[in-house]
Amino acid sequence: MAKKTYDLLFKLLLIGDSGVGKTCVLFRFSDDAFNTTFISTIGIDFKIKTVELQGKKIKLQIWDTAGQERFHTITTSYYRGAMGIMLVYDITNGKSFENISKWLRNIDEHANEDVERMLLGNKCDMDDKRVVPKGKGEQIAREHGIRFFETSAKANINIEKAFLTLAEDILRKTPVKEPNSENVDISSGGGVTGWKSKCC
Amino acid sequence: MAENSESLGTVPEHERILQEIESTDTACVGPTLRSVYDDQPNAHKKFMEKLDACIRNHDKEIEKMCNFHHQGFVDAITELLKVRTDAEKLKVQVTDTNRRFQDAGKEVIVHTEDIIRCRIQQRNITTVVEKLQLCLPVLEMYSKLKEQMSAKRYYSALKTMEQLENVYFPWVSQYRFCQLMIENLPKLREDIKEISMSDLKDFLESIRKHSDKIGETAMKQAQHQKTFSVSLQKQNKMKFGKNMYINRDRIPEERNETVLKHSLEEEDENEEEILTVQDLVDFSPVYRCLHIYSVLGDEETFENYYRKQRKKQARLVLQPQSNMHETVDGYRRYFTQIVGFFVVEDHILHVTQGLVTRAYTDELWNMALSKIIAVLRAHSSYCTDPDLVLELKNLTVIFADTLQGYGFPVNRLFDLLFEIRDQYNETLLKKWAGVFRDIFEEDNYSPIPVVNEEEYKIVISKFPFQDPDLEKQSFPKKFPMSQSVPHIYIQVKEFIYASLKFSESLHRSSTEIDDMLRKSTNLLLTRTLSSCLLNLIRKPHIGLTELVQIIINTTHLEQACKYLEDFITNITNISQETVHTTRLYGLSTFKDARHAAEGEIYTKLNQKIDEFVQLADYDWTMSEPDGRASGYLMDLINFLRSIFQVFTHLPGKVAQTACMSACQHLSTSLMQMLLDSELKQISMGAVQQFNLDVIQCELFASSEPVPGFQGDTLQLAFIDLRQLLDLFMVWDWSTYLADYGQPASKYLRVNPNTALTLLEKMKDTSKKNNIFAQFRKNDRDKQKLIETVVKQLRSLVNGMSQHM
């Protein structure tokens, strides 16, 4: 492409235990579809979706990670480049909620200090099998000062809202840039200032 | 004496008269006296004289006699005087008796009148009785006739009518009532005809109503005999079943046992009631009606009517319900009523003489058979459920066997069944397409994990997987294929069973069945499964995970095809060495699927690369690079590295091809970016930044992301870019132009057209600064050089055009 077809690029990351529905959440947001069969993600994958916020075209590059421990080394290498991270647990699986604290520590260890975070309690359509009360999710989110949504990829509940909210939070922290400036700004380089990935 | 002589001589007649008077009773005197007057006009005077003379004679004689008898007379008088006393006594007695007798006689007189009247009556009665004795038999017979009519014994009634006409009526034909009777007989005959016909109609209605039951019974009996035979065959087959599989697959035995149990249950059910057609339907109306019409000499009318009505009923029976094809019961009802119809005809054919002929039933059956075949062909084409088609086939076989048992030819039905078999296989293929789709839908596309020996054996029992290395590994361990592989293998065998089911009872040889099974299985593999696999592979949202696993899965399915051939061989018991045995072509299915999956992997990877490339945000007019590769490109490289790092189970060749394909695609995309017609100006700084990105690509290629590449094979993907960028950054145009066309040229892979396009973009950049150029010698010199090189490159390009 000769010129960019978007105004801003936001890189998001989905993390959480295996089987909580990370890929399904992403699939619902990017393709508005749902696959009932559980296919375990291997390594890393991503989808790109363009949204418009406050008059700006923003490309969301959303990385989908494998929750299995054997892919830990690969997936943590993507934390550094993320501007926003969604921590996903399964309301019908108490273990996945308990592990949220572990995932939060991973973020502190591998991600940028100012990364935007969000907690998602997925599969909220399966209330009859609920194990984690909504209040618990709200509590841990409050303790860490992050946003919280209960979602359902299957029933399409709160999915788009979660992603757009995260994008808005990131946008709020993004420096204002004149889109039509003719001046060459050497210091900006490529991408968004302050969010550029720092490659070794 | 003289007087006597005179008298005798003169009137002899008077003498005779006097004699008659003396000898004849008083009652007869009249005619005698009349004769005296009739004789002469004065004869009576003479007669009187004669009479007086006769009287005097008699007086003299009396006197003599009195003198003679005087003493006796006196004695007598004396006696008489005595008697007087007695007589007085007697008189009293007699008077008294007479009085009493008179009293008694009064009653007798009265009764005498009655007696006389009775006598007259008796005479009349006797006469009447005589007459009646002639009439009564007639009346009795007529009464009997009426009684027989009431009791519906019409044949007897006809006999009675005949007797009346021939024997009884001639005796009493003079009477009016007899005339009335004679006039009434023809009407009675017509009544008998009508009533018999009405009975026949009721009978026809009855057999129509009972057709289902008759047919059902007949078909059950035929099925009973067949089931018994099938049971024996199944028992024999079970022995083979035990040796059917190397891996001791249990399915065949279980299947046989189920069928056997079902057969036994059917036998029990059939024993509950065995009815003949006579038990269900009263045929006597037909016999009576036929007999009556024969007696009446109208047999042909009856036959014509019966046949006509039965043909109508046949058409009704042969007309199926519009939704017959929706359920097996619809077909069953259709068949049972047809069987019922023809069983009745067959019965009548054998029981009556001439009412129904073999030629007639054959004609009827041929008409029916054509109709049945047309109906079955039409309705079976609506069936989309293979189980229903199979049920239809079973019913049709029982139907055919039943009617064949009654002597009706059914070969055309079996021919039809072969058509239906092809359709059955088509519906099976459709059904199995759904089965395969479901299997693929439910697969998680990850290797099958087993935690202990028991689980391991379960998988082995379903799918013939043999790998000594895996067998030696300790638990937990994983099979290389995913769940869909054993499921598909099992379902292919189920398909073979289902396809085989249709051929049972169709009287075909094992060789033919084997051939048919292989053809069906080939269709399943080469068409249905192949189509499902390709559709799966081309699903819009399929991921690399699924595609990689599909490649592994198809490899193992391909290896399992030989076991499927053994499976078919064991089922049909046909030797592998038989000439012209059809082979399974499934191998090509799996090879094709694997190639498609591989191609799809390359496509998906390239699509991911495209998504990254679209994120590129070069500042094409930057004066200096920022010293680091572009962010989007680093992400791309890292992504590719991760992919090839985690898909270690991808077959080596496939991984290498995928990696090469990705690098080539990336290289092409980067080149296209430079040459994009929408990109008008490029600065040297931008070119230098671009070069930093290409360096990263080259580093990736040389890092051996996938094992097995020879030397720098992978880096060749970026050689075009490398030489182009070197040419521009070193500004080595004199060398390029001088060496152009030489095999040893340093810039052999740089296309003049490409160089020209890029150089013109850089010239435009210089033009933009034209004002300042006049004031700076270096810029002016560079501009002149660019113009010179542009001209030379154009001549090269034009030269190439001439060659084209």
Image: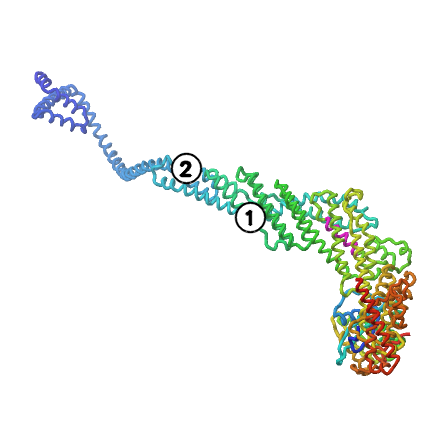
Count neighbours of disc 1 (C-alpha within 10 A) and say few if under 14, some if 14 to 19, many if 20 or more.
Answer: some
Write down the quadrant of residue B632 in the picture.
Answer: bottom right
Quadrant, the N terminus of chain B:
top left
Relative to B445, is B4 above or below?
above
* A198, A17: nearer the viewer: A198
* Tags 1 and 2 on a common chain: yes
Q: Can you identify the residue that label 2 sits on?
A: B164
* Image marks 1 and 2: residues in contact by CB distance under 8 Å: no
Q: Chain of mark 1?
A: B
Question: Magenta segment range?
Answer: B487-500
Tag of residue A130: none
Q: Can you identify the residue that label 1 sits on?
A: B315
* A95, B174: nearer the viewer: A95
Q: Nearer the viewer, mark 1 or mark 2?
A: 1
Secondary structure of residue under mark 1: helix
Q: Looking at the magenta stretch, what is its main secondary structure?
A: helix
Amino acid at dot 2? Leu
Asked if the stretch drawn in magenta spans residue B497, the answer is yes
